[in-house]
Amino acid sequence: MNSGYPRWAPYVLVAPFVLVFGVFMAYPMLYSAVMAMQQTYGPKASQFIFLDNFKNLASDPSFWTAVRNTFVFAAGSVLIQLPLSLGLAMLLNQPQVRGRMFFRLVFFSPALVGTVFIAMMFGLMFNKQGLVNFTLHGLFSSFDPEFPWLDQFVMGSLIIAALWQYIGFNMIYFLAALQNVSRDLSEAAMVDGAGPIARFRNVTIPAIRPVASFVVLLSLIGSFQLFELAWVLLNNSSGPNEQGLTVVMYLYQNGFISFDLGYASAIGWVLALMLMVFAIIQHKISTAGEN
C-alpha cells in the first residue's frame, strides 16, 4: 500500500540522529579503542604497543590506589547517602509534617549548586582555620584548632561533601516513588497486624524497587566518575599519599598532564568495563525477586 511518502523519507528523518551519534559517540569510542593500544607523546607522536597499556595498568600501584579510593567513595555513596535519602523521603512523605514543601526545597537546593563551588566551600570548612575546627574547638577546648582534615581524612571529607550535595537529589527520586505506593496495600497490611517494619519490608520496598535500583545505579556511575569535587577540594592534586586519587583523576593526570593519551584511553576503557559489570550485577540483584 502506497502511503504517499517517498521510500527515502524514513532515512532522511533518522539521518540527524545517525550523524550526531556517529560523530560524537561512535567515532570517539572507536578512536579511543585504537588509542588505548598506543603509547603517545603528545597529540601527534605515538607508536602501537597493542595491549601493553593494559598490562602496565595491572602492575601500576597508583592505578590500584585510584580503584580502591573510588570503591571506598562509591561504598560511602551507596551505603550512607542512599539510606539517608530514603529516610528523608519517608519523613517528608508524611502528611502530618508541617512545611514539607519548604524542607524539600531546602534539602534539594544543594544539587542546584555547582560542584566546584561546593568543593571550594568544603575546602574552606575543612581548612586548618576553617569552620569545622573552630566549632569543634569551641565545643571541646582540648580539640586541636588546626587539625588537618584534608591531610588525615581525605576520603571522609569527600564523602561528606558529596553527601551534602546529593542527599536531597536522591531524596526526590525516593519521594516520587513513595507517593506511588498503594495506600490500600498499606492499610490492608495494617489491618492484618503488620507493624511499621513489616509494612516497609513487604509493601514499601517492593513498590519502590525499580526507582531504588535506578538510584543505586546512578549513584555508582556518579561515584566512579568522581573528579571535580576531589580535584578542587584537594587543590588540584590527589592529596597526601594519593589518598584522594580516583580513577577519573588518574585518567586526567595521564592524559592531560603527562600527555600519554594512550594510557589514559586504556584507563577509560577499564573504567567503562567496571561500570558495565556493576550495571549487570545490579540489574541481576534488582530483578532476582521479581520472578
Image: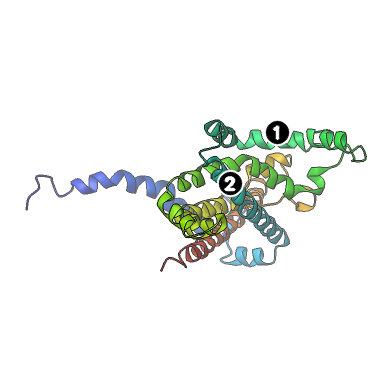
User: Residue 82: x and y, percent?
Assistant: 59, 50
Of the numbered discs in the image, which one, if any, rests on residue 85?
2
Residue labelled with disc 1:
121
Circle 2 residues within 10 Å: few <14, some 14–19, many ≥20 = many
Q: N-terminal of the two: label 1 or label 2?
A: 2
Residue at x 9%, y 47% (from the top left corner): 3
Q: CA distance from mark 1 to mark 2?
A: 22 Å
Q: Nearer the viewer, residue 278 or 196?
A: 196
Visible in this render: residue 43? Answer: no
User: Residue 56: x and y, percent?
Assistant: 66, 65
User: Residue 279: x and y, percent?
Assistant: 50, 60
Q: Is residue 60 left or right of residue 110?
A: right
Q: Secondary structure at mark 2?
A: helix
Visible in this render: residue 9? Answer: yes
Q: Amino acid at mark 2?
A: Ser
Quarter of the rendering containing residue 234 = top right
Residue at x 89%, y 41% (from the top left corner): 143
> Marks 2 and 1: in contact by CB < 8 Å?
no
